[in-house]
Amino acid sequence: MAIFKARVKEFEDIFAQDVIELKQLRQHTFNGVPDVLSFRALSWKMLLGYLGPRRSTWSTTLAQKRALYKQFIMELVLPPGHTHNGEGDSDDGNESRGVGLKDHPLSEGPESAWNTFFNDNEFLLQIDKDVRRLCPDISFFQQPTDYPCEIVVHSKGEQGRRLHERVVPSVLSSANVERKGLGVTKQQINLITKRSAENYAAMEEGQEAHWEVVQRILFIYAKLNPGQGYVQGMNEIVGPIYYVMASDPDLSNRAHAEADCFFCFTALMSEIRDFFIKTLDDAEGGIKCMMSRLSNMLKAKDLSIYNHLKSQELHPQYYSFRWINLLLSQEFPLPDVLRIWDSIFSDENRFDFLIKICCSMILIQREAILENDFASNVKLLQNYPPIDINVVLTHAVSLA
């Protein structure tokens, strides 16, 4: 208890400064953020570059970003010809967003807002499937948010404001990583095989579940990044970030969890974008390069395991592709993922420590790996056994 109180005091002192010392914040966050107050949400916002080190700029930055996000919703989410955003009646509702009588819902013209609206449903269908199975072991994403998006949930009978209404939901028993963007890969890796007993049902008028909020974040991101679009697996990246923002004890911040999450997610995606684009696989920050770094580290740290896996032709892509691509978000329970990401986000040489964590996961299972055959090792590494995450992180720190 004394150690915990001391750690809380450290973060209180850091965030009491007029100008936050980022080096000091990284050092303390690397060792884990206490699950009290707004420490983790604030730490992640700063480490991902959403907020600057000067406290006096925070209120202005947040106000501007949150207003910008609301504009994104109005322009990218609400259907063409919507009536004054559900906030009241308007005499010129048919002319809103520049959509008038010349743009008919059946128009197939390239400049037609309605044509774009219906084409968006292709990737929206995949987003809808993925967010409905987000973190199936907990009920958080199935629960209603206390701060629904008013211009969306109060539709006054207008269809299309709520994204899930545009597509017919279908439930899958598993999710695959299939990277599209600027290239297509045939490589598909199973993500989830377990299902929650609870139903990811949409809420009634005036309410929305957390998964609906995440759906909107991913949809807007895809719309703003057409060269990449939405790629399966992004839902697993945005999930933990949204959970942290939407669980912020500071209700004034929690009310804007959606906007804050969007900009933090966008910042993180700018760093791992190469993971999701096949044509960049061989780039320095590409997924093949990252897996090669892991393989080389394993070879340097334990040649016996390296040779054993090589002799079994158990290539890194069979297990580490998912580990690295999704920042280990599928390998451990959500609380452990948050602890891992504290350290990953604190890494100035971003993702160097991620490689060390992955290597430690293999080294910790040394005896089992050396005894197992190919099939058993595939099962072991693709379904990592329960373990105290601090054991893994401590081992990773020890790797020079």
Image (cartoon, rainbow, N blue to C red):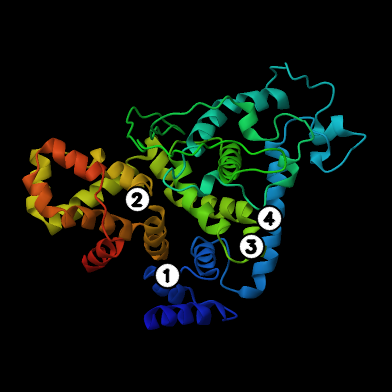
Amino acid type, mark 4 = Arg
The residue lying toward the viewer, choosing from 277 and 369, is 369
What's under tag 2, amino acid-wise? Leu
Which residue is rendered at x = 64% and y = 68% of the image?
58
| Residue 329 at least partly seen | yes
Q: Relative to residue 400, is residue 355 depicted above or below? A: above
Label 3–label 1 contact, CB within 8 A: no
Q: In this view, does 305 lie above or below 9?
A: above
Name the kind of residue labelled 3 in the image. Asn
- Judge by depth and name the residue closer to the eye, 158 or 270: 158
Instruction: Please tell me whether mark 3 sits on a helix, a strand or a loop.
Output: helix
The dot on residue 66 is 4
Q: Which residue is drawn at 14% across and 57% down?
A: 300
Q: Which of marks 2 and 3 is nearer the N terminus?
A: 3
Instruction: Find the distance from the CA under tag 2 to the CA under tag 4.
Output: 29 Å
- For label 2, the crowd category at 10 Å Cα-Cα, with few meaning under 14, some 14 to 19 and many 20 or more, is many
Q: Earlier in the sequence, mark 1 or mark 2?
A: 1
Is 256 drawn above or below residue 204 in the view shown? Answer: below
Q: Which residue lies furthest to the front in this view?
A: 197
How many numbered circles are shown?
4
Q: Is residue 315 visible?
A: no
Q: What residue is shown with label 3? A: 253
Q: Which of marks 3 and 1 is in front?
A: 3
* Residue 140 horizontal side relative to residue 394, left or right: right
**Tag 4 or tag 3, which sits nearer the N-term?**
4
In terms of secondary structure, where does tag 2 sit?
loop
Query: Could you classify mark 4 by the number of other residues whose Cα lies within 10 Å: few (under 14), some (14-19), or many (20 or more)?
Result: some
Tag 1's secondary structure? helix
Quote the CA–CA distance across marks 1 and 2. 18 Å
